[in-house]
Image (spheres, coloured by chain):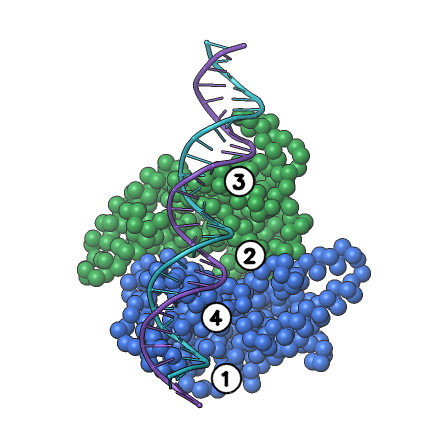
Chain colours: A blue, B green, C cyan, D purple
Amino acid sequence: MTTHMMIELIAVLTAVRGDVPQVMTIDHGRQLPSGPLESTHRSLQAGVRAWVERQTGHPIGHVEQLYTFADHDRILATTQGRMIAISYLALTRSHAGETGWRDWYDYFPWENCKSDEGRACLALIERLLCHWVAGMGHAAERVRQWQRCVSLFAIGDMVAWNDELVLQRYELLYEAGLVAEAGCPPDRAVPGQSMHHDHRRILATAMARLRARIRYRPVVFELMPEAFTLLQLQRVMESLSGVHVHKQNFRRLIMQQQLVEETGEIEERTGGRPARLFRFCGEVRQARQFVGTKIPLVQP
Amino acid sequence: MTTHMMIELIAVLTAVRGDVPQVMTIDHGRQLPSGPLESTHRSLQAGVRAWVERQTGHPIGHVEQLYTFADHDRILATTQGRMIAISYLALTRSHAGETGWRDWYDYFPWENCKSDEGRACLALIERLLCHWVAGMGHAAERVRQWQRCVSLFAIGDMVAWNDELVLQRYELLYEAGLVAEAGCPPDRAVPGQSMHHDHRRILATAMARLRARIRYRPVVFELMPEAFTLLQLQRVMESLSGVHVHKQNFRRLIMQQQLVEETGEIEERTGGRPARLFRFCGEVRQARQFVGTKIPLVQP
DNA sequence: TGACTTATACTCAATATGAGCATAAATGGC
DNA sequence: GCCATTTATGCTCATATTGAGTATAAGTCA
């Protein structure tokens, strides 16, 4: 029953610099930081928290378990034991130019529908998937997989783009052999940097989870500075979700939910009319942290 | 690095009998079924699936990872190694009177707000929590914890009942020392059967996850028979979520989403006017399984 | 000064939602 | 057969939410 096992903790540590969501990496952006579970850790959560805070020197806000993997890829070559990886999403406030931070969308350019680069990448993916489906033997399978492509990548305006399907889209590209991790030669692969092992997959899981969370829970504020303007908040939401937001409606929803309160200060350097600064009213809402945020995310 | 470890898989296997959600247990309802991870399993998910199907003889529909625990409670006494438990939610269609099945609400009577028993239990909990809070030293702490009680148990109509907060409510009762698992003597505990280890906590996690899932994904149908009337579907949704639904609005939403199609058959034995039978159109929707269901859940 | 930027307030139509009314079609009791 | 009761099903209506636009304020920069 008791066999040789290694438990590995993998952290997707995320922060936002300017408006750009970033992830902490090691090995020149090829891997996520990871470490073994130590017996001194009171719990898994405590283990991740302590270890990440020691590594980066930053206090961590939100920490959340993502997924536990134990696939055959993860069988250790050296011992006859198995490798179990428990992945976590951790949010931290800011960082002053330390190394290791990479942009989310270096790995998933197609997830950034806001940018021209993202849209170009999506157009390319559409062509490649079309080609992939066309090469299938059975007609029924062709139809089924094309349906899947259409709904995941919102091809042809039949369905709306769903920003939370990051993992499903990556898995489709993997199945279609369009990413380097699936053994695809770099010149045929879709744009986007690959990672070692299944780390890009784990990053996709984290992105999907965070995109889902910011919709219903006030976790964005873990990534914001103490005081911020409503446009700054909107820009962070947009860059995390990868889609545009209607500015006036965004303000309306934030205000009417009383998630934030005015600091009384004014931000002068907006490039236009000065803006009021806000802070998250976490104290009031800490006890009733279950009410949920609603953010209007729309198409470009 | 490589230490003695035991990986345990714990399954919350759920089915619905009549209108009643049930969970598979062992040890006279005191434990959830669990087994060690075997090296023959290709992946964790495959391991759970194979093992549960072998144990029950039923095919499993939806399988979903819940959470991985490694707290100090779980350190093995016999060896110096650590115990890791990976919990799963699994859904199966029906069962013909096998042993081991228990009602959800035997463990969590307060989660069933539909029933008189549930409402009575909630009234009792309100009194007990009030007493717990009153005994606190600091006034600030009293206010904070009472806020928490109010929002979790929807005390005094200030906030609406949120059916997805099963885990948070259980944790509050645990902290308040009102459940047997927290060392509370049975005569002082809140109604509801306790379980060994942290198994009731894991069940709470599963219930919360399933309540959240049925709102946005068409997983209810994994629990339904092949053909069903709309009222049967509604009753299952209500019993899973524990709250009432407006019948006409429920039908409207189900129909307009085209989740189901008529079988052409008629169910005569409704106790009133015969009802049309429906089936889930899974074939059509399998490819675009990401659209999401919307179910109107309201208060009694 | 005028073009441009951002901030902020307000309006309006389309849609979604919650709640109810009305009618249809079966049952069982008398 | 008649009537109370049960469930099924179709339809209406007020209200809330949402998407999208207009209008105005108050800065910057050339």
Instruction: State the image quarter where residue A137 is shown.
Output: bottom right
Q: Nearer the viewer, residue A63 or A164?
A: A164
Disc nearest the viewer among 1 and 4? 4
Check chain identity for marks 2 and 3: say if they share one: yes
Q: Residue at x 45, y 69 (%)?
A: A237
* Helix, strand or loop at mark 4: helix
Please give the residue where the numbered disc 1 appears in the rendered image. A100
Which amino acid type corresponds to the residue marked 4 in the rendered image? Glu
x then y, percent, for residue B111: 40, 45
Please give the residue where the numbered disc 2 appears in the rendered image. B64
Check chain identity for marks 1 and 2: say if they share one: no
Q: Residue at x 23, y 54 (%)?
A: B133
Instruction: State the image quarter where residue A277 is shown.
Output: bottom left
Q: Quadrant of the C terminus of chain B?
A: top left
Which amino acid type corresponds to the residue marked 1 in the rendered image? Gly
User: Mark 4 or mark 1, which is nearer the start of the sequence?
Assistant: 1
Q: Residue at x 21, y 62 (%)?
A: B140
Neighbourhood count class around disc 3 (C-alpha, 10 Å): few under 14, some 14–19, many 20 upward: some
Mark 3 → mark 4, Cα distance in angstroms = 35 Å
Neighbourhood count class around disc 4 (C-alpha, 10 Å): few under 14, some 14–19, many 20 upward: many
Tag 1 near tag 4, CB within 8 Å: no
Mark 1 → mark 4, Cα distance in angstroms = 23 Å
A212 lies left or right of A196: left
Mark 2 → mark 3, Cα distance in angstroms = 28 Å
Whether residue B82 is visible, yes or no, is: no
| Above or below: residue A37 compared with residue A27 | above
Q: Residue at x 45, y 39 (%)?
A: B246
Which amino acid type corresponds to the residue marked 3 in the rendered image? Arg
Please give the residue where the numbered disc 3 appears in the rendered image. B251
Tag 3 near tag 1, CB within 8 Å: no
Check chain identity for marks 1 and 4: say if they share one: yes
x then y, percent, for residue B250: 50, 41
